[in-house]
Amino acid sequence: MSTSTVMRDAVFGDHGTRSATLDRLPDGERARVVAIGGEAAVRRRLLEMGLCAGTTVTAVRRAPLADPIEFEVRGYHLSLRSAQAALIVVAPE
Amino acid sequence: MNAVAAPAGRPLVVALAGNPNAGKTTLFNALTGLRQKVANYPGVTVEKKSGRCHAPGGDVDVIDLPGAYSLVANSPDEAVTAAILTGQRADTPAPDAIVAVVDASNLSRNLFLVSQLIELGRPLVIALTMVDVAARRGQPIDAPALARALGVPVVPVTGHRRHGVDRLLVALHQAVVAPTPVWPLPEALWEEAHELSRSIADLPEPLRVAAARRLLAGESGGDLAAVERQPAVVAALARSRARLHNLGIDAMQADIEARYRWIDGVVGGVRGERPVGRTLSERVDAVLLHPVAGLGVFALIMFALFMTLFAYVGPLVDGIDAIVGWLQAEVGDAMSAGPLRDLVVDGVIAGVGSVIVFVPQIALLYLFLAALEDSGYLARAAFLMDRVLAGVGLHGKSFIPLLSSFACAIPGIMAARTIERARDRLATILVAPFMSCSARLPVYLLVIGAFLAGQSAWIQALAMLGCYVLGILAAVGTALAFKLMGAKRERAQAFVLELPTYKAPQPSLVARQMWTNTAQFLTKAGTTIFCLSVLLWAMAYYPRAPQERVDAAMARAEAEVRASPPADVDAAVERAREHAAGHAQLEHSVAGRIGHAIEPVIAPLGFEWKIGVGLIGAFAAREVFNATLGIIYAVGDPGAGDDDDEIAANEDRLVTALRADRRDDGSPVWTPLVAVSLLAWFVLAMQCISTTAVVRRETGGWTVPLIQLAYMNALAWAVCFAIYQVGSRIWGG
């Protein structure tokens, strides 16, 4: 069983405890992607943009109303609405 | 290595594919120069750019595909790119070779698309852009090593300086089919892919495993459509998926992660690593995305944009009007009086004028838009504004289109092209005409000046502000309703906004954007606007009023003037006779009859038939309402005149006539309540054929503009009905 799937089931399943998600990562801090939830098309696009399990992500800043959030991933800058950042489970580096 | 050769008798067809912001357009311009064709793909509003260039091995037709992050499409742009590359579009030939435009400073994510392009089995060349940016960041890319790792030619290019362009032209003919990498997939997934590939009969052997893997990863449609329909494949796919599910393997995630593991290996071998501090782009963003400073700069830029479209464009528009007026006078003098002269002068020349009058606004908007987009700021503006607009179901990139619509909905709707997500774009186009455009301003001023003149200044100011607020509220409500209708689909769409590295906008690219968009407006939307303008002219011109009726009206007007002769009696008589003739003709025309015919529909809103005629006239452009009222009240066009005094006098005459107008029962036609109702009508109603023509062009069909026309006018009618009916019960009309 792949690690990512186990984690996803644990986090998004009925009895998992909710761990840290990317939307709660404080500005300037780094974390490692553990799993990605959400509908297939959204998950696919987030993965395609390079947010794979194990990838390091840095929260750069939030827009004036705290949403969307700018991240640095794989050396480029990407912004996600916080509802979508909340689909990405992360662990401390 | 097999050289790529075009089938005899036609040039080699090469497609440029790459991520957004990878420098594709710059390279395309460098390759094709001025030999470009810009059109639209039929059925979708995606720009189709192609051009020819002369390469050492023979002519090459270059297609600039829309930017794409992946061949599994998430937007109409990406769908077109995927369809062409897989040979699924009948109107565009599948390319003989692909140039993958890869941003060296963002190598990892750019190579994801390359990992998909490799699997298409077509000859491939990599054009490596932004090599200098990567080097400055301490991450220089070893191009020969990248070529060895991928097995295809890699040519570093700097499009705007033409560095490497000649080498790329040579390399086009050396493009080769890249060897398919052995993706580091989980063992079980490989086994299932091979198992499934045995059910796929009608693909060449080497492509079967790749197709099987893509099917397992959840891809469908496009080039897989024929394969996935076969009963044997359907059954085998279901069995494979069940087995993978039991093993806890998510095939889609495993597939994408395997590509990135392969990419990490490639990048590790070709990219130098020298630690550098924050990049210039990041330091700039510390200011431009700052909650206070960033919003301040944003407000300044938007203010400059708005003032350009709203105020500074004035002299250019006046200039066009003056030229059109001069041309009308010259041609009018040269031709003998009659229907032909009227058609040429008032129909054709005025119709052309009604199209080119939009050119300054469109050109200037595109000057801003192209510069903002090319510099990378457009994405930042969207980032700053997204939260506010997302709340009502729009997108950060809706801001500039909506702001521009306060000047004119036409450039505003055209600016919505910068929005990638189809639904956000449609929502923006739907609500943009609710913004009070500058053509409504003369109507607001006339109505408020004439009927709220007795009120205090702050009531007048409030009425004006109310018009703008009502429009914004209607837009918000409409966008929210649209959001609720599509809530489910909305959740299924990702919002990913890349914040590309800043760069200086290239003047040539900006100028080209300005030119192609303006030219497209003139040729596509312009022809529709012109035809509708001539049609509206004909509606006011035909049928001709009988001469005896016109003579009688002129005689009556002359008698009235002579009954109480003013100082300059001859001029007054001349003017009165002219106005009376205009009135008689308009009332007799199709437009005049429609004004009468729709009276039962508009009477509950407080509008009498003369207002109805004005509303018909306003379809040409909203400010024409004033001119039409002037004619129907037989006082002449309030905006016409040789100097400011004459214009002011004309306006005074119209206001006086409006105030004096009485219904058959002696009550005034125009009450403050009618004025309020009419203002609400002008805020909410869609009565601008030019906007409708542009919406048709931008959405690729008549469905959206007709729904918009029906919706906005129904809403306007309902609101005006409520205002007038409730108001007249409270204040008695």
Image: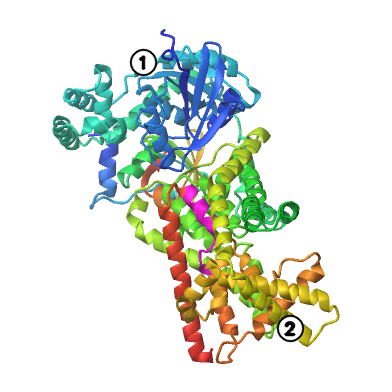
Mark yes or no: residue B275 visible. no
Task: Report x, y in % for residue B616.
Answer: 54, 67
> Badge 1, how many Cα within 10 Å: few under 14, some, many 20+?
few
Q: Nearer the viewer, residue B126 or A36?
A: B126
Examine the structure image and report whether residue B691 is included in the region drawn in magenta.
Answer: yes
Judge from the rendering whether residue B324 lies leftward or rightward of residue B81; answer left or right.
right
Amino acid, disc 2: Ala
Task: Give the image location of residue B678, x and y in percent.
Answer: 56, 75
Dominant secondary structure of the residues highlighted in magenta in the image? helix
Asked whether the viewer can see residue B2, the reply is: yes
Mark 2 secondary-structure assignment: helix
Query: Where does label 2 land, which residue?
Result: B559
Q: What element carries label 1?
A: loop
Relative vertical location of residue B629 with respect to residue B61 in this rendering, above or below: below
Query: B552 or B331: which is nearer to us?
Result: B552
At 63% from the left edge and 21% from the top edge, which residue is drawn?
A: B162
Tell me the amino acid under the disc marked 1.
Pro
Query: Whole-percent x and y of residue B634?
Result: 67, 75
Question: What is the chain identity of the residue bearing mark 1?
Answer: B
Q: Which chain carries label 2?
A: B
